[in-house]
């Protein structure tokens, strides 16, 4: 009998979700994974709610066709703009037994624990900032926290274009860090609320005062997923465990293999797929 493949789906608009996948694989290595980057339509951060929702739902349906029982939207923009509709409207009708999870709630649940001053800065795409999802979610778990958001619209294009180490990155990183700290000098914790931003950590760390903690999401999301699978054995049992990882992109596989390796930290080989056809 052939064993049914039910990899955990991991989705991002482009390469950023690979920084999350890397941590998921480190924390939960026995599961199978399938990653999809919608590179042909990235970035999502500047697109409307309707468009991000439509693109993300197309991707989720594709994951379901691949046999996934559980999909992680490893993209803050998609989590902010599409997750609620997918969970509340689509899944009950089209796939009541499948699960789609995001990255905002698990991050908001713990970020307050990192701060001594209770002043938290959130660095994110314009779309994530406008959705105000982090403000709502962090205040839900940490009602006393002061949270300031900073939209950094140039950071994803800089990272996607391989300019993370260049002088342009220095300029745009400093611009937004300085602006955020001028808004609230008591911030002692800066959350990288976009999965692309870990590639800018050397520049971000150089731009912030030494007492400020810069917090990426990967390991937070990974421990939250491990906890979820423990609390939901009925879902965990449906996910296949062969330790296989498939990488898929809606754009050039040559570009994905080259750039994706930088985000994932290891060489990888991708397949091309089409969405929305
Ligand atoms: N990496 C995605 C996020 O976490 C956004 C990138 C984009 O704008 O497409 O928000």
Image (tube, rainbow, N blue to C red):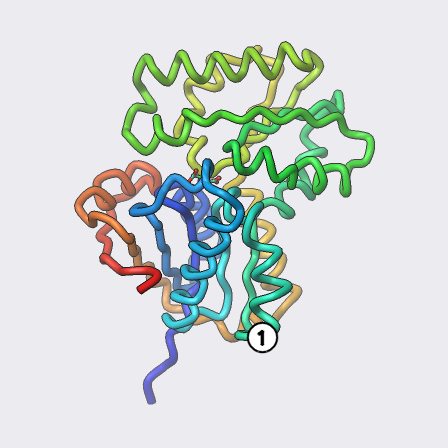
Give the labeled residue for mark 1: 93
Q: Where is residue 10 in the image (x, y as percent from the top left)?
A: 43, 55
- Toward the left, the furthest residue is 254
Which of the pair 21/78 is nearer the observer? Answer: 78
Q: Is residue 268 left or right of residue 223?
A: left
Which of the pair 168/129 is nearer the observer? Answer: 129
- Toward the bottom, the furthest residue is 1
User: Which picture quadrant has residue 7?
Assistant: bottom left
**Quarter of the figure that contains the N terminus:** bottom left
Q: Residue at x 61, y 18 (%)?
A: 212
Q: Position of residue 250 (x, y in %)?
A: 28, 53
Q: Where is residue 268 in the image (x, y as percent from the top left)?
A: 25, 49
- Label 1 CB sits under 8 Å from any ligand 1 atom: no
Which of the pair 208/230 is nearer the observer? Answer: 208
**Quarter of the figure that contains the C terminus:** bottom left
Against 249, residue 132 (above or below) is above
Q: In this view, does 256 lie to the left or right of 224?
A: left
- Toward the right, the furthest residue is 144
Q: How many marks?
A: 1
- Judging from the image, what secondary structure is the residue with disc 1 in? helix
Q: Residue at x 63, y 24 (%)?
A: 121
Q: Residue at x 57, y 10 (%)?
A: 209
Q: Is residue 113 left or right of residue 38?
A: right
Against 32, residue 173 (above or below) is above
Q: Residue at x 43, y 67 (%)?
A: 61
Q: Where is residue 190 in the image (x, y as percent from the top left)?
A: 59, 25
User: Which picture quadrant has residue 92?
Assistant: bottom right
Badge 1 local density, few (<14 within 10 Å), some, or many (20+)? few
Q: Quadrant of ligand 1?
A: top left
User: Which picture quadrant has residue 135?
Assistant: top right
């Amino acid at each position: 009998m052939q064993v049914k493949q039910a990899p955990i789906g991991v989705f991002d608009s482009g390469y950023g979700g690979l920084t999350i996948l890397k941590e998921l694989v480190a924390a939960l290595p026995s599961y199978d994974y399938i990653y999809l980057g919608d590179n042909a339509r990235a970035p999502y951060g500047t697109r409307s709610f309707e468009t991000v929702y439509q693109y993300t739902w197309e991707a989720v349906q594709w994951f379901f066709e691949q046999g996934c029982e559980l999909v992680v939207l490893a993209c803050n923009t998609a989590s902010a703009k599409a997750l609620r509709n997918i969970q509340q409207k689509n899944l009950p009708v089209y796939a009541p037994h499948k699960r789609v999870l995001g990255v905002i709630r698990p991050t908001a649940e713990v970020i307050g624990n990192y701060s001594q001053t209770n002043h938290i800065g959130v660095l994110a795409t314009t779309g994530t900032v406008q959705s105000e999802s982090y403000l709502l979610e962090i205040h839900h778990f940490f009602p006393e926290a002061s949270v300031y958001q900073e939209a950094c619209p140039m950071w994803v294009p800089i990272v996607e274009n391989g300019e993370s180490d260049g002088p342009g990155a220095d300029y745009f990183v400093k611009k937004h860090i300085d602006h955020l700290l001028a808004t609230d000098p008591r911030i002692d914790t800066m959350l990288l609320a976009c999965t692309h931003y870990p590639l800018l950590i050397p520049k971000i760390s150089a731009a912030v005062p030494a007492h400020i903690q810069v917090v990426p999401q990967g390991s937070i999301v990974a421990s939250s997923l491990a906890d979820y699978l423990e609390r939901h054995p009925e879902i965990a049992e449906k996910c296949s465990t062969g330790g296989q990882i498939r990488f898929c992109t809606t754009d050039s596989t040559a570009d994905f293999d080259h750039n994706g390796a930088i985000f994932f930290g290891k060489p990888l080989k991708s397949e091309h797929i089409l969405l929305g056809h």
